[in-house]
Image (cartoon, grey):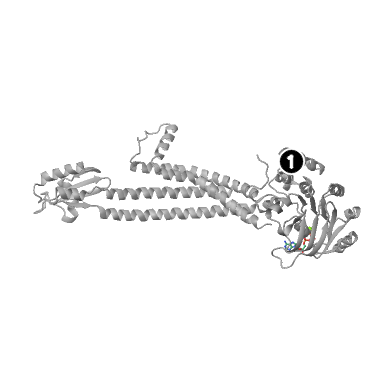
Amino acid sequence: MSAPVSPGLRSGSLPLLVALMTLLGGLSLAGLTGVQTLAEGWAGAARNATTIEIPSDTPQLEDRTRTLIQTLHKTPDVTTVRELSPQQVQTLLAPWLGQISDSGHLPGLSLPVVLIIAHTGTPDLGKIVHETLPEAVVEEDRRWGERLNGLGISLVACAWLAVSLIAAIAILSVGMTVRRSVMAQRKAVEIVHFLGAGDMMISSRIAGRAALLSLAGGLTGLFFLSPVITMLARKLAPFSRDAGPIALPATTWQSMLVSEWNTLHVLPHLLLEELGALPLIAACLGWLTAQTVVLVWLRRLP
Amino acid sequence: MIRLLNVSMMPPDVGQPVLRNLTLTVPQGEFRWLLGASGAGKSSLLRLLTLETRPSAGQMDLLGVSISQASRTTLRNLRRRIGFVPQDYRLIGEWTVFDNVALPLRLRGASERDTRREAFAVLEWLDVAHLADKRPGTLSGGEQQRAAIARALIGRPEVLLADEPTNALEDAQARRLLATFQELVEMGTTVIVATHNEALIRETPAASIILQDGTLAGTDIQDGIAALRSNKA
Ligand SMILES: Nc1ncnc2c1ncn2[C@@H]1O[C@H](COP(=O)(O)OP(=O)(O)O)[C@@H](O)[C@H]1O
Ligand SMILES: [Mg+2]
């Protein structure tokens, strides 16, 4: 142990507070990630589907439909082309046309052919369809996409607001707790100051202790956060494209730990990095607050 | 050397100066009693000389440094050359007696070996070496006072200021302390001791600084003793 030349810092409430704030901050970050993933999924789903309706009175309907389907299959970015069966089309149109009688056909109305195209990116399907089958109507689900997108954006904005508020509260309360514990050392600080200790010598030691206590609190908070995070990862896993091999049912706790660890990879790397940074951020915050409080206050002494 | 010229001192939130127009000189390597009735301003003058506050008016020189113009760094370095026994001891409660006493040497950057040796020498001399690992809070008043004296004596300061340093001591210990102060004076330290201990003053007559209501009322020790008496009356 190094010889004391300046008071340290003792505070039970600082690590506890930082632990709670880390927990809260981590939860809000995880929530933000969840909301973001969800919103992206919605927007993506709407963005990546296009419906094509081909009126039933189109000449050479079957041949030309087949040509269109083949052309679409060859189009880059198109992943699947599905032709709805007449029953599916009926079900789809039921809300507008009413339930169909047992004959299976609406009197005097033949149903259009409906194609559902799934794609990535934004291929210009309208142009392709127009060239091959000008009678067809391209129904890009853009309007829905826009609405979902709008909803997603406002949800993400709310989540961001919550994260920012929690961050602000955390910074304030950690700052205030550090200040209070520093003030509790006031007498000792004055003693060493008047015996000739330098400002930086005093502030650095207190700030070092504040950083250490905050780091300990942050790590504790992270420890209690991890079950929540792995649970979130497990819930998100099915939505993830690169989820990797599904973990085998755990038999020993080692394999359970390994599978827990594997599920973590499902989470966006950014979230994991942010969570890992929380204790470090807490430590920096504690250090900076303590330094500032002590230096400002020593400046008032001659 | 300590030199004050028309020095006044006003605590921040007090409307009146507690020291007014003090002019005095103490050459290096001399001893002074600091006498005066309770509330006369003895502790205030010592606070000024330990650089806890700067004068609100007047000129003060300490060890060749003009205090009103000195930077904070200069004051810090100056403080390391001054030993002080506060009236209320001011030991750090979380530290052991040893760490408290070792502090001035450590601040000067002394090696741990030298620090240990010197700290134990002075603690032994004051009969509190056996308490080195204890916290100040567990000590009696007299033991705490001796720890505070040890911290002031360690490293042989150029200026030694003591505020009622024999308050909690037995007579024999007080006499021994005064003999040590005299030794320090012979080695070139300037020593100023505020006290109410009339017997001690009588045994060791010396030039004095006599304060009355924050002003200098004289330097004659007989006047000082009279001032103490008036206080008791
Ligand atoms: N920081 C302060 N704030 C207010 N009053 C003070 C302060 N320091 C000293 N005084 C006043 O100055 C006078 C001298 O006090 P002090 O120097 O402690 O006297 P002594 O040590 O001779 O008993 C007292 O009346 C005291 O109340
Ligand atoms: Mg006093």
Relative to the observer, which residue lies in front, B72 or B130?
B72
The quadrant where ligand 1 appears is bottom right
The C terminus of chain A lies in which quarter of the figure?
A: bottom right
Instruction: Report helix, strand or loop for mark 1.
Output: helix
> On the rendered structure, is A70 left or right of B95?
left
**Amino acid type, mark 1:** Thr
Label tally: 1
The part of the image, by quadrant, that contains residue B103 is top right
> On the rendered structure, is B116 left or right of A156?
right
- Label 1 CB-ligand 2 distance < 8 A: no
Relative to the observer, which residue lies in front, A232 or A114?
A114
The residue shown at (69%, 63%) is: B12
Residue A9 in sight in this render = no
x and y percent of residue A151 in the render?
33, 55
The residue shown at (73%, 37%) is: B113
The N terminus of chain A lies in which quarter of the figure?
A: top right
x and y percent of residue A149 in the render?
32, 53
Q: Is residue A250 above or below residue A37?
A: above
Q: Is residue A142 above or below residue A258?
A: below
Relative to the observer, which residue lies in front, B88 or A204?
A204
x and y percent of residue A29 in the render?
43, 49
Q: Is residue B178 above or below residue B222?
A: above
Determine the residue located farthest toward the bottom in the rendered image.
B15
The residue shown at (49%, 48%) is: A22
Residue A257 in sight in this render = yes
Residue under mark 1: which chain is it in? Answer: B
> On the rendered structure, is A169 left or right of A35?
right
x and y percent of residue A135 in the render?
13, 52
Residue highlighted by disc 1: B115
